[in-house]
Every structure is written in C-alpha cells, then in structure tokens.
Amino acid sequence: MLVGDGAVRSPAGVERLLQSLARNVATEASMSTLGADAEPDPLHRHTVRAYLDALRRIFVVEEQPAWSVRLRSRAPLRKSAKWHLADPSLAAAALGANAERLMGDMSALGLLFESLVVRDLRVLAQPHDGRIFQLRDAAGTEADAIVEVPDGRWLAVEVKLGGGDAIEAAAQSLRRVRDKVAADRAEQLVAMVVITALGFAYTRPDGVQVTPITALGP
C-alpha cells in the first residue's frame, strides 16, 4: 500500500498501528508502547516512526505537542506529545466500538471525548493562527489543552465528562497551572476553562469558566 511518500507499507501493519493509536488516543504513548500494543504482532519502534510520518502526511494522525513555558517551580516539564487521530470517530471505528461498548468503558470514552475537544479547539483556533498544546510537569500539574495565539495570549483547558467533583478537580488543576507559570505568561492568560459533555455554561467564583462542548464557538 502506498502511504503519503510513495513508499510501500504493509496494510496489516498500518491497521494494527491505527488500532494501537486508537487505544492510546490522547495519551503520551511512546513509539515502543505503540509498537508493543499493535496486536497481535508487535511493530518495531522504527517501523512505528516510519508509519506515523506517513500518516501525518495524509492528515490521519496529529500530535499535540508539549507547551514550552517557564515555570516558577523546579518541577521539569514533560516533553512528550499526545497522540490524536484526525477525528475521534476514526479511533472508535478502529476499535470497532459502538455506543454501548463505549458507555461500558468510561475511561476510554473520556479519552475519546478529550480528543474530540482538542479537535474542536484546533478548528476554532486555526483562523487566529492559534496552536494547541498540552502541559504536564513532573509534579502532576497539568492542562489537557493550552490554546496559544501568536501574540502570546493563551487559555488553559481541562476536559471532563462528569460534573461535580470532576469539575472541582479540573478547576484546581487549572489554578495550579496559572500559579506556576512565570509572571509575564500569567499576565497573558485569557481564561481558564473546564469543558464538559453536558450542562450549561457559567463562571465559578474563582474565575474558572465551565462550558459544555456544545457551547464552544469562535
């Protein structure tokens, strides 16, 4: 099979890699992990790298790189990118997962929902030349998505399927991100947003906005 660069690829190998990517969507899985998870026959990491390069060229696979930002704390930033397929429906199809199966595996559904939000943020940011990153440090401070535009303004996003305690935890995580970045970057923070699957949009007393995915817009 020809993929992107004209080189011959194994259709079975590409299919196994796509299934592995689907199982590891919205995670920082390494090349070795993706290859080992390509059941039933693992792929060598060099093969995985070659296939991923080809899949990027035809816009099937997208990376969500780590955000490069100065932190007040000494906890080092993790540099690995998260993996996404161009649309989370591709991941569901690769796994053969219908609605019933997904509702029975909330962990997998949560990752697919995160990937859906990242896709929508990417689309909405493009007219503004914005880019989508993710942030995670060794101390556990994280944001599922950082949206940054060329003039340096940015917003921090956490994605949650549930409400209540999940939203509270997400808000705490976003506040930690705000408090840990260098002062000049904190001044450029436009918003902290928790994106949910359902509900209505509102702003918490701490300034964190809670918004259902259906309310996202330009």
Image (cartoon, rainbow, N blue to C red):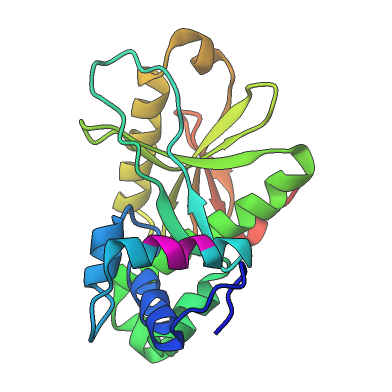
Residue depicted at 40% across the width and 34% down the height: 174
Q: Is residue 64 left or right of residue 131?
A: left
Q: Which residues are magenta?
A: 49-53
Front residue of this view, candidates 101 and 18 = 18
| Image coordinates for residue 163, horizontal then vertical, percent | 38, 57
Q: Position of residue 212 (x, y in %)?
A: 56, 57
Residue 131 seen in the figure: yes
At which x and y percent is residue 64? 48, 48
Locate residue 75: give its quadrant.
top left
The image quadrant that residue 96 belongs to is bottom left
Q: Is residue 83 above or below residue 79?
A: below
The residue lying at 67 percent from left, 31 percent from top is: 149
Say which quarter of the image contains residue 38.
bottom left
Does the magenta segment cover residue 75? no
Q: Is residue 213 above or below residue 20?
A: above
Residue furthest to the front: 7
In this rendered view, identify the residue nearer to me: 19 or 69: 19
Quadrant (top left/top right/bottom left/bottom right) for the N terminus: bottom right
Reply yes or no: does residue 52 show up in magenta.
yes
Q: Is residue 141 above or below residue 112?
A: above
